[in-house]
Image (cartoon, grey):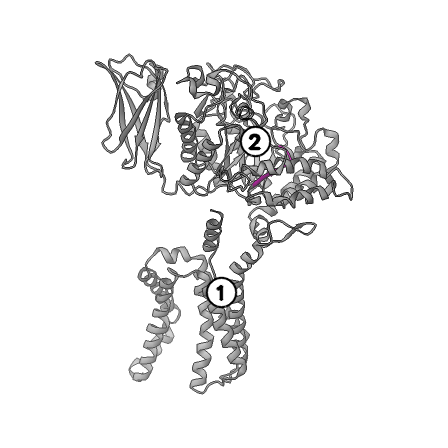
Amino acid sequence: MTLLALFGLQHPTSAAIIKKVAPTFWWAGMKNPELQVLLYGENISSSDVSISAKDILLKEVVKQENPNYLLLYMDLSEAAPQSFNITLKQGKKETVVPYEIKQRRNDASDVKGFNAGDVLYLIMPDRFSNGDPSNDIIPGMLEAKVDRNEPFARHGGDLKGIENHLDYLDNLGITAIWLNPIQENDMKEGSYHGYAITDYYQVDRRFGNNEEFRKLVDAAHAKGMKVVMDMIFNHCGSENYLFKDMPSKDWFNFRGNYVQTSYKTASVQDIHAADYERKLAVDGWFTESMPDFNQRNRHVANYLIQSSIWWIEYAGINGIRQDTHPYADFDMMSHWCKAVNEEYPDFNIVGETWLNSNVLVSFWQKDSKLAAPRNSNLRTVMDFPLMEHMNRAFDEETTDWSGGLFRLYDYLTQDLVYADPMNLLIFLDNHDTSRFYRNDEDTKNLNRYKQALAFLFTTRGIPQIYYGTEILMAADKANGDGLLRCDYPGGWQSDLRNCFQNANRTARQREAFDYMQKLLQWRKGNEAIAEAAIRAGCDCFFGYPITPQSEVPEYMSAHLPKAGGVFLGCAGALLLILVSRHGTGHTSCVKGDVLCLVSAVSYATYLTAFRNVIVKYSPVTTMKWMFLFAAVVAAAVYYRPLAAVDYAALAPRTWAGIGYVVVCSTFLSYFMVPIGQRYLRPTVVSIYNYVQPVVAVLFSVAIGLDTFGFTKAAAALCVFAGVWLVTKSKSRAQVEAEAGMKKG
């Protein structure tokens, strides 16, 4: 009855007990209207299935070898948000499974993925901070202990601990958090790292719950930080119900029998490799406790793909790091990446591509020519070879081309093998490798640290740092993976030193932290380092351009017309002002110049900073409130002068002039601007203001108040040329769209 209550199931006379419903709910309005619902319960395969929703089509009911499973495929293309019942009927007995289709957020597809402008901070939740000791041990879970003295036991870190230190990460300059797996790992031992998932739709209860994770994501977003979720499609934990009670033998490779992988994933692209070599690498199990999914089974593939989309939609995460990417089926993973990006165009996925050369790594990146005609659709790959080079280069004092900084230069010259060098995850270390410093003695060499960070944060790609690097945490993989993932000092109340606080760090730790902070804060939001300078072909290292020089003309053609147009227009307008300021016989007045300059700046701010407001409301509404306010202010300021005027004595010509000023030069002028701004960029709207001094000069010449010579003609030509260049230039959106089309 407890399980039934958990899922809200009703069965007045039913013998069936539903243990799992996956996913527990879904959303209307997804671009892919198909939904797979997995039901797991005792002897349910013989049930007749029906649904109460009239606008949802039950396309297919799939039975498995195991009678405890049913797979329902539904078409939601016409479905509205609603609650409905799935009814399983066996003779006179029936089980009713309530199900909900939720309303999507309006901006659900506009998830902003991580990119080269970000720096990822890798956290192993169990080892970072214990914010809620009450969830350290959960009754009924298989590992019922916490032992911080045991490297392979659970230590008690959780989501609350991470949330408690978001300010610390923000202050450091972090823009994205990558969390090692947080999904349920209900294994008997050694699963503190999270890579043996036993339920793909639940946060591990020792970390918190689903709602707490969503709260963490929202809190990170509020501080301008993205969240990347670690996922594993290649394998699961042996305590996963899908393995313990398999739907069918072909849900797992080698029909559920343990066969060890060779770990030689280079055989996937090896033209000389035997088919069995590839099969052993891809289909073999990672360990005996991590059975390998058969992703060629369409039901398995749908289950895994849906689970990732569910977390994106539910929690609003910004990216996924996919574990052991080359160990999984190439075609299935390609389909998954494509499906995710069709639903969330700006979302980013990085695959763990732990291979020993850039050629092998590049094979797995989207649009790689080495993989053609196949395409992984994997936007970002992990640059493990660069990690190896960085860990050696800053220890080598040499002028030899095979060592030192030349080693990095030589490697970067080979970036032509990558389809997109900017979408490489670059790092000094992570949870699977020795830390950048292997022991405390080595941390005395801070020059090595500073040189490495300076390179990491300014070269091409997406930088990632491992938690604790900022305070010189050291570990050698030779001493075991558990020590690579040691606790952050200060994350537990019993810790003697709290390194989250500056006062508790050693002098050397403070120097390291301050240096990283300075670089990260400088890098944060710096378009020049994240994109613009790189795309302009700026030098990074020994004169080596970070990206191909072919991007230089593209960059210049996109940006120079606008910049040149603004410069010409400004120059022309300024020249006209300088040569015409005494045209009426008046002397120079600094006060007048300042007032006119303030007016121009104010108007330009109105056109740019408040563009969204201008476009949002109709021009009539905008003008109504603008002129009402102006009339009230003018009446208050100029009441006495206005009251003193003898309006009856004014000539018709004077009234006509007043009418022209009010209607033509004021109302119509301001009325047309918001209309024009609906179709033009603020830059273009502003540049048209440069026409004003030209018209003023021409009119002054026409009525004899000024003269027209070569200087004024040249100035007028500059103004019109500037206006033309700006109107012909491309917006940032157009440039990015064209770049996307070229890549696609």
Residue 617, given in percent of the width and then of the height, sits at 34, 56
Residue 711 position by quadrant: bottom right
Residue 600, given in percent of the width and then of the height, sits at 48, 67
Q: Principal SS element in the magenta part?
A: strand
Q: Residue at x 69, y 44 (%)?
A: 410
- Where does the magenta region start and end? 424-429
Q: Residues within 10 Å of mark 1 (few under 14, many from 20)?
A: few
The kind of residue tagged 2 is Ile
- Residue at the spot of label 1: 601
Residue 596, given in percent of the width and then of the height, sits at 49, 71
- Residue at the spot of label 2: 123
**Residue 170 inside the magenta-drawn segment:** no
Disc 1 element: helix
The kind of residue tagged 1 is Val
Q: Nearer the viewer, residue 709 or 361?
A: 361
Q: Nearer the viewer, residue 187 or 134?
A: 187
